[in-house]
Image (cartoon, rainbow, N blue to C red):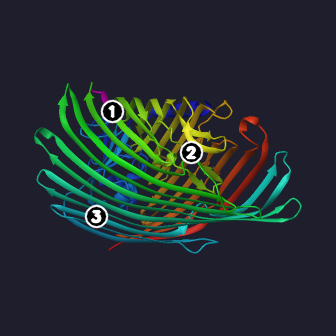
Amino acid sequence: MSAWTGIVCVNSILFLAGAASAQEAGQAGVIVYPPSFFTAYQPNSANDMVGRVPGFTVNQGDANVRGLSGAAGNVLVDGERPTSKAVSVTDILSRIPPSMVERIELIRGGAAGIDMQGQAVVVNVVRKKEASVSREVEVWTKLYTDHDPAEIGYLRGSRTGPALTLEGTVQVRQEAHYDSGDGRLTRRNGAGGLISEGPFRSRVDNELIEASGAAEYRAGPNTFRLNLGVSWVDLPRTEEGDLTSAAGVAIPERSRGISENDRGEVGLDFSRRLDGGRRLRLMGLHTAKKNVIESRLLTPTTDQISGKEGRAGETLTRASIDGFSLFGFSVETGAEAALNTLDSRSSLTVGGVPVAVPSANVEVEERRAEGYVTGNRKLSGALSLEARLKVESSEISQSGDADHSENFVFAKPRVVLTWAPNAGMQVRLRAERLVGQLNFEDFAATGDLLSGSVNAGNANLVPERFWIGEVAAERRFWGSGALVLTLSHSQIEEAIDLIPIQNAFDAPGNIGDGWRREAKVDFSAPLDRFGLADARLIANAAWRTSEVTDPVTGLLRHISRERPFEGMITFTQNLPKLKSSYTFQVNTFGWQETSYRLSEVRVDEDAYQLKFYWDVRPQPGLNIRLQLENAIGKEKRRTRTLYTGPRSAEVVRQTEHRSYLFDPFIMIRVRKAL
């Protein structure tokens, strides 16, 4: 509670500071930033500009969520979310040069004609309509101490004409993954006696090829859009432990594995401006994915091999219409229908003998439909209301090792009340019912020996539900400063965590009711008044706590893999005379995750990371970045407490601790407009 009290005190002090400057104040709930606001930062793309919007943090959305509404991030382009899940928000914004940005709008609490899709705050990048051509190439290298140099390249281009706009990106990456490093592995018995210890090495590569493109054709009131995306990602991994027993006997361990993720997507979008300011939008999207995970663990006493191949597909359509009034509300309504499929095959062998894992081979199909209506209304000069109702219906069927079918119908109401007494202050109250999506992968078994776990599938999952109450207080100060404090409390029904299956395996499952609380701070302030011209301090932090009942011990605990704290501090300053800028950034305390399994408690930790980079712009269209990453090294740690039988017996069989350090490295990036 002390952290929450401190946040409230700091927030209260700054709420008494001066109001936002007139140049930032737009209509209630909307702050407009012209291109001139970003000139001092010399941005290379719309992505750089969005990153400088005070009090805003980009949410990429979740491409793995089925449907479009659940996958939505908090960035719009010309008032629309792109009909794409394979292409990230960062890549889309990176294709837009600063010269083509007319303005950037920060929309808080909702606005007429904007589908917030569950986001409290969104940014809208509005492009100019004039003709233009943009081409650029970007190359990176990373110089490691124990790895071949990274090879990364981008080629981007766009062309805007009176009726046709074309955009495209090709990306190639070959680099070391952050899970690489050298360290030490130690195992002890339940009494604390040494079993084995020795050096430990992890080598993980990130190999990626990705291409995406978009075309937009405008003809009178009609707009047609086409989005294409394809990617191939490989993550080969090697782990080696040169261990020695307490008696001095060598006990080498070797594990090899690879994760392959291929994805292709095509999206179509048609919109038409109707009479009376209304707008009709029709969307279609098809996505195909293939995922392969293979791993092998070899020790003097065991040889284990696990494998999994999954093929998934999604085909959806969506229709919406907005811009009409009803009972004083500006209304949007729409519907979405989708067909989702998964075909998963898994295997596990120990010493050459196959091991039967529940739900190793399953096929899953979901037919889902959702309808919604959203209304925005100005209640007074300072008070506005957003109300929304969604109704979701789905049928999920499984075949193969598990034959099961289930129907679900959920209503998901949402109310947001926004109070904005002036341009520099806003308070948002939100009450909403959320329904989590079932992860199809949870229906099927998954083995990854490199992470030391094998999960069974669970055919009896039901979606977890949340009633969430949230208050967000925002204060604009010092011209371009912003402080946003958000507090939320969620009541959870049928929380999903890990449960025991056949008293031998772990699997995702429902563990009953619980709650979660979160406090977030987003802070951004110019430092001119402290004698640091063109300098800015940005800080983001989140504190979380939760409570559920452990299905093994019956005791109260946190939700598995919940991170109690995450935070980042960034200091940046522009140096116009040197045509450059520099930035210091630190992930303040890293993060920690705890997982509770049938016979194991696992704690994964990622230590804080410090980086420094210097951007030089010797001439227009040319940017050179020199970056020192992991300035003091980036340590990852994993501690496993293994029990003899279920954890409820409280008999510790073994503890395992491993840590490894990803050494500092230098990155060089050159970005050139052609």
Q: Nearer the viewer, mark 1 or mark 2?
A: 1
Determine whether the residue tagged by mark 1 lies in a helix, strand or loop: strand
Does 52 appear above or below 142?
above
Residue 391 bears which disc, if any?
1
Question: Label 3, label 1: how many angstroms apart (C-alpha)?
Answer: 36 Å
Determine whether the residue tagged by mark 2 lies in a helix, strand or loop: strand
Could you classify mark 3 by the number of other residues whose Cα lies within 10 Å: few (under 14), some (14-19), or many (20 or more)?
many
The residue identified by callout 2 is: 566
Residue pictured at 59% horizontal, 31% vertical: 547
The residue identified by callout 3 is: 167
Could you classify mark 1 by the number of other residues whose Cα lies within 10 Å: few (under 14), some (14-19), or many (20 or more)?
some
Q: Is residue 543 visible?
A: no
Question: Label 1, label 2: how many angstroms apart (C-alpha)?
Answer: 34 Å
Residue 644: give x, y in percent of width and height. 76, 43
Q: Which residues are magenta?
A: 381-390
Residue pictured at 42% horizontal, 63% vertical: 576
**Which is nearer the eye, 652 or 431?**
652
In the image: residue 224, left or right of residue 354: left
Q: Is residue 591 magenta?
A: no
Residue pictured at 39% horizontal, 56% vertical: 88
Residue 222: give x, y in percent of width and height. 14, 52
Q: Is residue 447 visible?
A: yes
